[in-house]
Image (tube, helix red, strand yellow):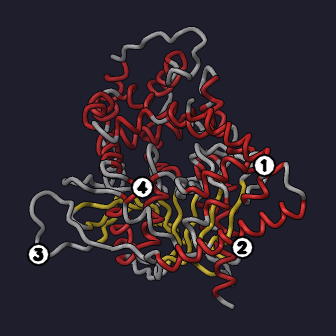
């Protein structure tokens, strides 16, 4: 008997047992389950550590010097005729392979549509103009733990009576700080009683941040470096927001120094899903969701469980296994071929926005994004040669058992806001989120959007951040 058959047999057994209970016994079961769950949660809360070690590191080349330059320098993104000519020469030498008939995006990036993207890139995309777009916000660099850390820092347009709050937003892979360009004006100029001073760093090894020169740089190291960055900027308390790797990094920031993080907002919800209670909730939840704290929307997003949470993830995670094992090997071709790089990156912006896009000839890419924006993100990787170090981040985080790492077994105690987008790769019900986040102030079932939330749905994302922060601020002032 296979695993799925065992699960289905268990479900039928539970259904039969629960179906034979009268209403009074069923209510007693619900109350008993809730009581036991509350006791177990309390005991776990009492025994678990409240913070994780901050540590220290040195990621520069060679030995660590006795002092480090802490100056913050203005940085301007630049390009050149030679850079554009080299790009065009490589594009012109691209060899394409015809796609299989009716394959759409199910085999990866469809080469018929790729030809159209590449033609636009070669003949219409203006990198020089896009560099001006990138430079519309102030860019800076500062050396932390031996490497140059790049960030943009946008101060708000403050109105009378508004409270200015610092907010760090952290990207993931294969994104960049550019993902936040459309949401920044919605946060730095608001009609609310709060407005934000936004800091968007590039993870070391991504974009304009220098890549670590030594092994071992993971989300914990990035979290510590970003804490040092905020301290260097003069912030003692601030909000953090993240998705993808940014969600892990900002989680770590909240765990390391909760006294500095006023609130944590995530658009990718990370919670442990390996407990017996969660396994039972999966078995029961489809048929009796109220018994395990599921909503109707949870049921819609979670089931059929094997298809959405096992098979779909297997179809979409091949890149992860490559990058977590031999990133340098796979990265060689991507670092040398701009078209190969574009196909590799943009395929994620297709399927991770909506898995249904795999059945479309054009991957649905231009439904949510413009080619200018998509290719600008690709160019940030191409011109900085950062695809390989960005891929190494997977190996550094996954070379040991990720589930037993200190941050994975430590809860988060700062006020937390969770935005659950319907087309995110995995859905985490609020009932599960409590296993990791002790103070959930806001859990929003977003009406649309996928993995690249700020890039796809900046208005929705900004509204959710603002309402969460207002809840935190109103309670803290009472």
**Residue 301 vs residue 102: left or right?**
right
Q: CA distance from mark 4 to mark 1?
A: 34 Å
Q: Residue at x 79, y 44 (%)?
A: 16
| Whether residue 152 can be seen here | no
Label 2 belongs to which residue? 192
Q: Residue at x 72, y 68 (%)?
A: 34
Mark 3 / mark 1, whichever is N-terminal: 1
**Residue 169 vs residue 383: left or right?**
right
Q: CA distance from mark 4 to mark 3?
A: 36 Å
Mark 4 / mark 1, whichever is N-terminal: 1
Q: Are marks 3 and 2 in contact (CB under 8 Å)?
A: no
Observer-side mark, 4 or 1, equals: 1
Mark 4 / mark 3, whichever is N-terminal: 3
Mark 4 element type = helix
Residue nearest the observer in this picture, 380 or 268: 268
> How far across and down, in percent of the image, does residue 302 sit?
68, 44
Q: Residue at x 18, y 60 (%)?
A: 60
Mark 2 element type = loop
Label 3 belongs to which residue? 66
Crowding around mark 2 (Cα neighbors within 10 Å: few <14, some 14 to 19, many 20+) is some
Q: CA distance from mark 3 to mark 1?
A: 69 Å
Q: CA distance from mark 2 to mark 1?
A: 52 Å
Label 1 belongs to which residue? 17
Mark 3 / mark 2, whichever is N-terminal: 3
| Whether residue 272 can be seen here | yes
């Amino acid at each position: 008997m296979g695993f799925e058959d065992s699960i289905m047999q268990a479900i039928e057994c539970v259904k039969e047992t629960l179906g034979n209970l009268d209403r009074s016994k069923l209510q007693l079961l619900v109350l008993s389950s809730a009581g036991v769950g509350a006791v177990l949660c309390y005991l776990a809360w009492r025994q678990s550590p409240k913070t994780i070690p901050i540590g220290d590191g040195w990621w520069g080349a060679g030995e660590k010097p006795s002092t480090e330059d802490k100056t913050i320098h203005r940085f301007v993104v630049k390009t050149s005729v030679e850079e554009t000519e080299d790009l065009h020469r490589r594009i012109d030498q691209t060899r394409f392979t015809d796609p299989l008939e009716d394959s759409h995006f199910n085999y990866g990036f469809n080469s018929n549509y790729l030809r159209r993207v590449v033609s636009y890139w070669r003949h219409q995309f203006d990198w020089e103009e896009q560099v001006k777009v990138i430079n519309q916000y102030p860019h800076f660099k500062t050396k932390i733990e031996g490497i140059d850390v790049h960030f943009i820092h946008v101060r708000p347009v403050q109105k009378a009576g508004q409270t200015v709050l610092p907010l760090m937003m952290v990207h993931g892979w294969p994104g960049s700080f550019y993902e936040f360009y459309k949401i920044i004006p919605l946060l730095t100029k608001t009609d609310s009683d709060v407005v934000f001073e936004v800091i968007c760093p590039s993870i070391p090894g991504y974009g304009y941040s220098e890549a670590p020169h030594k092994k071992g740089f993971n989300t914990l190291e990035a979290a510590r470096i970003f804490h040092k960055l905020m301290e260097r900027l003069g912030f003692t308390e601030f909000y953090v927001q993240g998705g993808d790797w940014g969600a892990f990094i900002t989680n770590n920031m909240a765990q390391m120094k909760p006294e500095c993080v006023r609130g944590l907002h995530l658009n990718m919800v990370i919670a442990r899903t390996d407990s017996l209670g969660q396994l039972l909730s999966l078995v029961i939840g489809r048929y009796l969701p109220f018994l395990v704290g599921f909503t109707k929307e949870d049921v819609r997003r979670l089931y059929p469980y094997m298809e959405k949470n096992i098979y779909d993830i297997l179809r979409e995670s091949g890149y992860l296994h490559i990058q977590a094992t031999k990133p340098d090997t796979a990265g060689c071709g991507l670092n040398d071929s701009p078209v190969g790089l574009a196909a590799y990156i943009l395929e994620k912006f297709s399927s991770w926005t909506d898995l249904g896009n795999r059945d479309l000839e054009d991957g649905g890419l231009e439904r949510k994004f413009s080619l200018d924006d998509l290719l600008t993100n690709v160019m940030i990787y191409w011109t900085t040669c950062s695809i390989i170090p960005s891929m190494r981040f997977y190996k550094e985080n996954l070379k040991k058992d990720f589930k037993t790492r200190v941050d994975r077994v430590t809860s988060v105690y700062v006020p937390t806001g969770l935005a659950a987008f319907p087309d995110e790769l995995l859905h985490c019900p609020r009932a599960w989120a409590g296993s990791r986040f002790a103070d959930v102030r806001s859990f929003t079932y977003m009406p649309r959007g996928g993995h690249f939330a700020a890039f796809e749905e900046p208005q929705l994302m900004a509204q959710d951040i603002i309402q969460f922060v207002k809840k935190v601020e109103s309670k803290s002032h009472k």
